Image (cartoon, coloured by chain):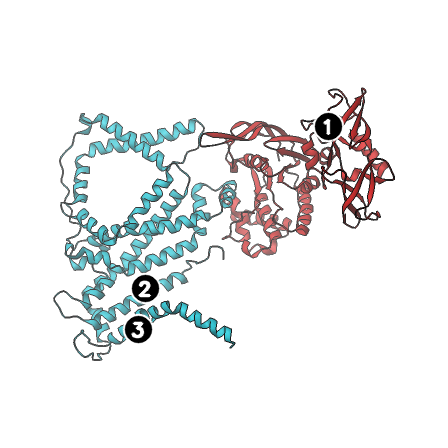
C-alpha cells in the first residue's frame, strides 16, 4: 500500500532522430489505497503511464515517487507491484499453482511450506482452489483472469496495476468481474491503478478517474465530478453514455451573471460567469440526453429520425437541422412517440454546459451540489 | 458412393500419386529388397543364396563395424547436443534488438548455403599438417604476449564501455554484438599502438598437430571425428538457428514482461519461459539433428584419403564401404544388414526421445 506521485513525468520515443512525446509533463497524485482509473481513447498514453509505474517503460523526464520515494531507476520487481495484463500473460507451460507461485519462487525468500500456504490463501480468496493443478489452456477466460490476479496478488504488492483486464471477457462476465474487483479492493485495501478505454468501467470502479487525451491529463476527479462538472469539452463527450449533445450557441447579450444565447434560433438565458465572453461569440452548448425532456410547444423543434426502445427508456434521434448531428434525447420507455413525428425539446437552463472555442468549460454559477439537489427534484 | 465423391477421391489419388510412387519405389521396395538381401550372400554378380543370420553375426564380430557404431553414436550425441545449444544461444542473441542485427543474421546464416563438399575441402585444407589451423595456432603461441594484451584490453574496454553507457543512464546489454565489436576494435588499436615495444616481442614457436591423418583418440572419439564434429556443426547450426529464431519471435512479449515484474532475471526468463516455450522447436531440431548425424556420410566420404578409415568411419559409411569396398568384392548382403541395423538404431533413438518427454507441444 502506498501513494504514487507523478511530478512532470514525460515520456518520449525517439525513432530515426525524431522524438515523439507520448506523455507530456504529467503531474498527478494517487492516494494510498485509492482505486484510480486511467481512461481515454486509444493512443492517449494511459497504458504508457501504467507501464511507467510498473517499470516496464523508462521515464524520459520527471520524477515518479512511491510514498515520497523516487522509483524511476528501480526495476519492476523492486517496486513491489503486481500487474495483470490484458492478455493475462499466464505462463502456458506451468500449472495454475506454478503460475501463482512463480513470483514467490523468483524472490526465493519463502520455504516450500510457506509458499504453498501463500498460494492456497490467494486461491481461496479468488475461489480457484479446484483449478490449481490445471494448465492455463484448460481454463475459461474468467478463470484465467482470476489466476492472473492471483499471481499479481501473491507477493502482497504495494500497488496493484491492471491493464484493460476485462476487455477479453464477454459482457455478462465483465459485469460480474467488475463487482468482484470492487470487492477485492475493499478486502485488500491496496492502491490500484486500472487502465481502460471504457468509460462505464471507469465510472463504476473508480474512486478517482484520470481522463487522458493526447498524452496529457484532461481532468482528475471522482466519477460524479467528471459527469457533473467536466472541465473540458473532451471530458464532457467522453464521460457519459450515450454521449453528450453539443450544439453551437451564439452569445446575443450579456449581463454580469446571465448570458443570453441563441441555440438553433431559440433564445436561452443561462446563469454563468460571463467574464471573458463577448457578444457575437460562438460557444458550444453541451446537453446530456438524460437532461432533455419532450414538452408541448416551444423549445427546440425536431423530427424523430429513429427511436431505440430499451424497455425502461427510449433513445430518440431527432433531426433538428439538416446540416447538424442528430440530437439525442433519453425519455421514459413508455413515451408515446413514433418515427417521423415532430416534437419539441425543452432545455433546462440549469442542466447545460458551456465550452469556449478552446474546449474549456465556462464556469457555471450553479454548483454541483446544488445541481444534485435540482436533479433529484427533477426526477420526482 | 456417389458420383461426385468417387470423382473427388480420383483426383485426390492423382494428387498424392507422386508422393506415393516415390514412397513405394524408394522406401518400401528398397526396404524389402534390403531386408531380403540381408539374409543372402549377394554380391551383385552371383545368384543370391540364403545364409540365415550369418551377415548380422559377421557384422557384430567385425571390428570396423564396432568402431563405426561407437563413432556414430558418440558423434550423434555430441553434435546434436552442441548444435542444439549453439543454435538456441545464437537464436536468442540475434533475436534480440541490437545495432546491426540484420548483418549478423545474414552472417550467421551464410555457412548453411555452402555445399557440404566445398566445406569439407576447405576444412581438409584447414586441418592439414601445414594447414591454416596449425599455422594459426603457431602464430598464437608465438605472439602470446600481444595476445594477452589484446584480451586484457578487450575486457578493459568492454567494462569501460558498459560503464560509460550506464553513467549516461542508458541500459545496455552486456552481449550486444556492436558493443563487443567496438571493444575488440579498441583493444586492437591498443595492441597496434604497443607494437614494436618489448611488451609484444614474438617468440618463435611451431605447433604441429596431426588433425586428420591419425588414429589417436581425444576423449571418446578419434581426433579426426572431432574435426568432423566441428565442421558438421559449422554447417548445420545456421539452419537450426533459423528454426529457433522463428520460435523465439513467436513467444509473446507479455510473458517476458510478466516475468520481469515477477522478479525473474534475464537468465531465469530464458530458463523458465524461452526454453519451455521452444519445446516444440527443440523437438524438431533434436529429431532432425539425431537423424542427420546418425546418417552422417558425405563429410566423412569426402575426407577420403586425408584420414585413415578407422578414425572416420560411421555406420552410413560402413554400409557404403561394404557395398563398394575399394578394390574388393561388393558385399551387398553385409551392406543391407548393416543398413537395417542403422535404420533400427535411428528409429529407436527417435522413439526413445519421444518417450523421454521431449514434447511436441509447449502448452500441453
In the rendered image, residue B197, in percent from the top left (x then y), is placed at: 18, 25
Q: Which mark is residue A283?
A: 1
Q: Residue at x 68, y 49 (%)?
A: A176
Vertical comparison of B192 with A124: above or below = above
Is residue A195 visible from the viewing direction of this image?
Answer: yes
Mark toward the viewer: 2 or 3? 3
**Which of pointers 2 and 3 lies earlier in the amino acid sequence?**
3
Callout 3: chain: B
Callout 2: chain: B
In the rendered image, residue B83, in percent from the top left (x then y), is placed at: 32, 51
Which image quadrant for residue B77? bottom left
Viewport quadrant of the N terminus of chain A: top right
In the rendered image, residue A141, in percent from the top left (x then y), is placed at: 60, 52
| Callout 3 crowding tier (Cα within 10 Å): few <14, some 14–19, many ≥20 | few
> Marks 1 and 3: same chain?
no
Instruction: Name the secondary structure under disc 1.
Output: strand
Viewport quadrant of the C terminus of chain A: top right
Horizontal side, residue B130 vs residue A216: left or right: left
> Which sits in the foreground, B142 or A89?
A89
**Residue receiving disc 3:** B29
Mark toward the viewer: 1 or 3? 1
| Callout 1 crowding tier (Cα within 10 Å): few <14, some 14–19, many ≥20 | many
Chain B shade = cyan
Mark toward the viewer: 2 or 1? 1
Q: Residue at x 70, y 29 (%)?
A: A231
Q: Residue at x 16, y 66 (%)?
A: B325
> Marks 2 and 3: same chain?
yes
In the rendered image, residue A13, in percent from the top left (x then y), is placed at: 50, 32
Q: Which mark is residue B346?
A: 2
> Marks 2 and 1: same chain?
no
Vertical comparison of A214 with A201: above or below = above
Amino acid at each position: 500500500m502506498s501513494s504514487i506521485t507523478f511530478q512532470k513525468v514525460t515520456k518520449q520515443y525517439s525513432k530515426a532522430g525524431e522524438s515523439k512525446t507520448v506523455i507530456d509533463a504529467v503531474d498527478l497524485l494517487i492516494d494510498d489505497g485509492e482505486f484510480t482509473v486511467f481512461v481515454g481513447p486509444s493512443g492517449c498514453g494511459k497504458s504508457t503511464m501504467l507501464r511507467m509505474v510498473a517499470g516496464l517503460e523508462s521515464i524520459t523526464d520527471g520524477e515518479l515517487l512511491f510514498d515520497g520515494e523516487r522509483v524511476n531507476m528501480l526495476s519492476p520487481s523492486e517496486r513491489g507491484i503486481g500487474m495483470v495484463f490484458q492478455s493475462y500473460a499466464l505462463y502456458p507451460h506451468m500449472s495454475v499453482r506454478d503460475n501463482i507461485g512463480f513470483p514467490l519462487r523468483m524472490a526465493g525468500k519463502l520455504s516450500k511450506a510457506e509458499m504453498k500456504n501463500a498460494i492456497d490463501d490467494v486461491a481461496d480468496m479468488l475461489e480457484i482452489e479446484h483449478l490449481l493443478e490445471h494448465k492455463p489452456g484448460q481454463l475459461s477466460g474468467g478463470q484465467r483472469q482470476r489466476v492472473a490476479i492471483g499471481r499479481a496478488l501473491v507477493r502482497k504488492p504495494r500497488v496493484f496495476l491492471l491493464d484493460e483486464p476485462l476487455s477479453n471477457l464477454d459482457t455478462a462476465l465483465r459485469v460480474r468481474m467488475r463487482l468482484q474487483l470492487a470487492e477485492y479492493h475493499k478486502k485488500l485495501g491496496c492502491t490500484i491503478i486500472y487502465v481502460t478505454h471504457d468509460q462505464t468501467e471507469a465510472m463504476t470502479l473508480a474512486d478517482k478517474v484520470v481522463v487522458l487525451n493526447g498524452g496529457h491529463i484532461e481532468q482528475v476527479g471522482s466519477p460524479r465530478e467528471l459527469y457533473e462538472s467536466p472541465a473540458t469539452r473532451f471530458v464532457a463527450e467522453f464521460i457519459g453514455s450515450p454521449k453528450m449533445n453539443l450544439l453551437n450557441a451564439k452569445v446575443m447579450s450579456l449581463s454580469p451573471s446571465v448570458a443570453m444565447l441563441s441555440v438553433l434560433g431559440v433564445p436561452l438565458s443561462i446563469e454563468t460567469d460571463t467574464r471573458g465572453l463577448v457578444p457575437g461569440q460562438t460557444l458550444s452548448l453541451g446537453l446530456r440526453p438524460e437532461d432533455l425532456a419532450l414538452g408541448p410547444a416551444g423549445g427546440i423543434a425536431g423530427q424523430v429520425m429513429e427511436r431505440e426502445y430499451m424497455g425502461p427508456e427510449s433513445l430518440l434521434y431527432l433531426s433538428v437541422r439538416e446540416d447538424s448531428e442528430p440530437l439525442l434525447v433519453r425519455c421514459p420507455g413508455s413515451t408515446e412517440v413514433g418515427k417521423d413525428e415532430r416534437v419539441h425539446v425543452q432545455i433546462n437552463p440549469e442542466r447545460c454546459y458551456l465550452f469556449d472555442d478552446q474546449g474549456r468549460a465556462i464556469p457555471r454559477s450553479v454548483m454541483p451540489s446544488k445541481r444534485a439537489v435540482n436533479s433529484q427534484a427533477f426526477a420526482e | 458412393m456417389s458420383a461426385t465423391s468417387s470423382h473427388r477421391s480420383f483426383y485426390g489419388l492423382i494428387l498424392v500419386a507422386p508422393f506415393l510412387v516415390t514412397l513405394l519405389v524408394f522406401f518400401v521396395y528398397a526396404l524389402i529388397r534390403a531386408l531380403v538381401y540381408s539374409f543372402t550372400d549377394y554380391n551383385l554378380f552371383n545368384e543370391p543364396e540364403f545364409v540365415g543370420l550369418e551377415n548380422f553375426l559377421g557384422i557384430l564380430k567385425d571390428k570396423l563395424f564396432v568402431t563405426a557404431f561407437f563413432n556414430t553414436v558418440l558423434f550423434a550425441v555430441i553434435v546434436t547436443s552442441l548444435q542444439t545449444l549453439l543454435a538456441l544461444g545464437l537464436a536468442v542473441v540475434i533475436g534480440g534488438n541490437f545495432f546491426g542485427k540484420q548483418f549478423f543474421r545474414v552472417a550467421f546464416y551464410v555457412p548453411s548455403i555452402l555445399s557440404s563438399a566445398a566445406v569439407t575441402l576447405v576444412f581438409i585444407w584447414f586441418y592439414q599438417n601445414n594447414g591454416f589451423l596449425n599455422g594459426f595456432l603457431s602464430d598464437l603461441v608465438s605472439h602470446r604476449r600481444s595476445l594477452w594484451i589484446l584480451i586484457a584490453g578487450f575486457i578493459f574496454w568492454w567494462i569501460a564501455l558498459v560503464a560509460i553507457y550506464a553513467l549516461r543512464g542508458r541500459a545496455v546489454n552486456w552481449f550486444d554484438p556492436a558493443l563487443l565489436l567496438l571493444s575488440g576494435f579498441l583493444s586492437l588499436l591498443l595492441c597496434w599502438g604497443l607494437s614494436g615495444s618489448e611488451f609484444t616481442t614474438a617468440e618463435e614457436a611451431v605447433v604441429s598437430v596431426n588433425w586428420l591423418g591419425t588414429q589417436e583418440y581425444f576423449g571418446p572419439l578419434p581426433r579426426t571425428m572431432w574435426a568432423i564434429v566441428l565442421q558438421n556443426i559449422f554447417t548445420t547450426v545456421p539452419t537450426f538457428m533459423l528454426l529457433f529464431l522463428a520460435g523465439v519471435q513467436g513467444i509473446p512479449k507479455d510473458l517476458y514482461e510478466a516475468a520481469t515484474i515477477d522478479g525473474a532475471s534475464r537468465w531465469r526468463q530464458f530458463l523458465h519461459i524461452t526454453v519451455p516455450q521452444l519445446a516444440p522447436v527443440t523437438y524438431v531440431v533434436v529429431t532432425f539433428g539425431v537423424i542427420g548425424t546418425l546418417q552422417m556420410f558425405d563429410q566423412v566420404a569426402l575426407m577420403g584419403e586425408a584420414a585413415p578409415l578407422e578414425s572416420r568411419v560411421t555406420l552410413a559409411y560402413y554400409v557404403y564401404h561394404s557395398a563398394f569396398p575399394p578394390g574388393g568384392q561388393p558385399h551387398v548382403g553385409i551392406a543391407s544388414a548393416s543398413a537395417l541395423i542403422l535404420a533400427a538404431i535411428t528409429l529407436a533413438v527417435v522413439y526413445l526421445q519421444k518417450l523421454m518427454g521431449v514434447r511436441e507441444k509447449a502448452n500441453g
